[in-house]
Amino acid sequence: MTTTTLRTTGVHVEDTGSGPTILCLHGIGSSSASFAPQVAALAGEFRLLAWDAPGYARSADPESSLDLDGFADAAAAVIEEYAAAGPVHVLGVSWGGVIAVRLATRHPELVRSLVLADASRGSGTAPEKAAAMRARAAELDAAGSDAFAGGRGPRLVSPDAPGELVDRVVATMRDAIRLPGYGLAAESMAATDLTSELAAIDTPTLVLCGDQDQVTGITESQALAGGIPDAVLVTLRGAGHLANQESPEAFNAWLSSFVGIVERLYA
């Protein structure tokens, strides 16, 4: 594994393995560390680029305010620097999936396929969702990262998740989030409704969702799969919102199979 920071944007990237490249975009309360189960199992088959989003974990704070376009452009810069302008497969978990969709519509030449895991169309689909998302920055500022992560982290997995996983999710969130990055991410979600963009996506797409996801839920994954032409929806039994961490064997099997099929189509 190599860890490097982009000279132009200060974005930290974990670069592991070899083979077809998968860019891994984490959720709003996480970091590159959340893809450890994928790196451990798939680095012999694929090259995995896992970022810390701008303003998260080991990445620098952005020099100016970022909206969803800005985060998508930052992801495009990772592809351009690490993968010779792609195209690459893009795995987006939760907020990372929202970025991935905007990346696919804004920079379609850089995206070979999409894997949207427990993602959504954004929080702008309903006023109450947008308001709750916007409130998170103030909650983090008031509580601090330890208490904030301790309160939110356990909701991201199923009720039956082992304590070791819950502890790991909480620790990852605690170490990843800070202001202003988290606030910019929350605003990017609150201001976004991707519904009208989905039909324009012209890339193979797999939508994965834990059947115990109580954060974005199966209905959002259904909306994504229903709106993206020819997208495939798979639910993973017993997994919560962080299905890639809670059911890694099933998740990795679907990811590997899907990317392999797409690679054969482009061979």
Image (cartoon, rainbow, N blue to C red):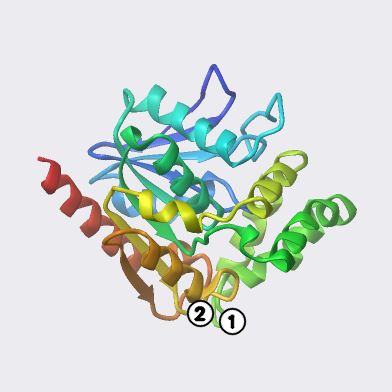
Q: Residues within 10 Å of mark 1 (few under 14, many from 20)?
A: few
Q: Is residue 248 visible?
A: no
The residue depicted at 45 percent of the width and 79 percent of the height is: 211
Q: Quadrant of residue 237?
A: bottom left
Q: Is residue 29 above or below residue 220?
A: above
Q: Mark 2 highlights which residue?
A: 212
Tags 2 and 1 in contact by the CB under 8 Å rule?
yes
| Residue 62, image x, y percentages | 68, 29
The number of numbered badges drawn on the structure is 2
Q: Residue at x 26, y 52 (%)?
A: 204
Quadrant of residue 16 within the rendered picture = top left
Image-based side of 160 in relation to 37, left or right: right
The mark closer to the camera, 2 or 1, is: 2
Q: Nearer the viewer, residue 143 or 116?
A: 116
Crowd band around label 2 with a 10 angstrom C-alpha radius: few (<14), some (14–19), many (20+): many
- Under circle 2, the secondary element is loop
Residue 213 lies left or right of residue 150; in this view the side is left
Tell me, for residue 88, which label it has, or none: none
Q: Amino acid at mark 1?
A: Pro
Q: Residue furthest top?
A: 7
Q: Which residue is depicted at the point 76% across and 39% down?
A: 180
Q: Position of residue 14 (x, y in %)?
A: 46, 36
Residue type, label 2: Gln
- Residue 57 is left or right of residue 203, and the answer is right
Residue 159's disc number: 1
Q: Secondary structure at mark 1?
A: loop
The residue sitting at the right extreme is 142
